[in-house]
Image (spheres, rainbow, N blue to C red):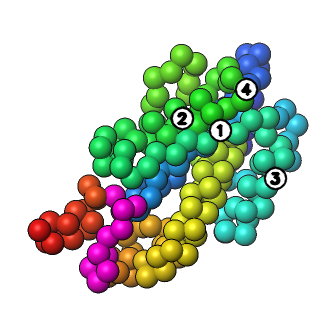
Amino acid sequence: MDNTKYEKALKKEGIKLIAGVDEVGRGPLIGPVVAAAVILKDKIKLDGLTDSKKLSEKKRNYFYEEIKKQALAIGIGVIDEKKIDEVNIYEATKLAMIAAINDLDVRPEHILIDAMPLELDIPTTSIIKGDLKSITISAASVIAKVTRDKMMYELDQKYPMYDLKHNKGYPTKKHIEAINEYGIIKEHRKSFGPVKKVIEESK
């Protein structure tokens, strides 16, 4: 698969500043949803870069450092669990993506987005499975994933009983058992099923 075809098509039109946008953390029961926006330089060497979910942690960390070296600009957007509970995860994901775009030091001329439609004053293309089909979105997916994983490792230091270093906040059997045994912490998303159930049962 040519994961540069969207970028090549835009460059043929004279568009050079192309941002890729992706998010991570829609499914977890804990912590923020994190989005990244990345504008890559013209000449890049990122062979093997693809959707962060398809890379090992070692590979993700390698590409994270490489992307930081080879990017023209990187923006991060973080929407915490309180806002997620307030507006729902879909809207929070949009907010995270917009925050990431606004965090860029360089204003893009066009934005490639993984699946999500965004209303912006910059032209956009939403691509289904964009994290596989566009190298710029792949770069954003790696930055978002590594950024959020680091947050989960830090939280795991404080609350090892939830096994966040392994589950990254997703609803694994061990995580749900820990919620039932130890209750919830402020970083849990109160509107998400297993967490909501514990809150209701404790009333």
SS assignment at label 4: loop
Residue assigned mark 3: 66
Q: Earlier in the sequence, mark 3 or mark 4?
A: 3
Q: Is residue 65 left or right of residue 139?
A: right
Circle 3 Cα neighbour tier, 10 Å, few/some/many (<14 / 14–19 / ≥20): some
Q: Which residues are magenta?
A: 179-189
Which amino acid type is marked by label 2? Answer: Ala
Residue assigned mark 1: 75
Q: Earlier in the sequence, mark 2 or mark 3?
A: 3
**Which of the labelled discs sits on residue 106, or is there none?**
4
Q: Earlier in the sequence, mark 3 or mark 1?
A: 3
Marks 3/1: CA distance?
A: 16 Å
Of discs 3 and 4, which sits in the foreground? 4
Q: Pick the quarter of the image with the C terminus.
A: bottom left
In the rendered structure, are the residues bearing label 1 and label 2 in contact, judged by CB atoms less than 8 Å apart? yes
Circle 2 Cα neighbour tier, 10 Å, few/some/many (<14 / 14–19 / ≥20): many
Viewer-side residue, 196 vs 143: 196
In the rendered structure, are the residues bearing label 4 and label 2 in contact, judged by CB atoms less than 8 Å apart? no
Q: Is residue 184 magenta?
A: yes
Q: Above or below — where is 101 with respect to 58? A: above
Q: Quadrant of residue 145?
A: bottom right
Which amino acid type is marked by label 4? Answer: Val
Q: Earlier in the sequence, mark 4 or mark 2?
A: 2
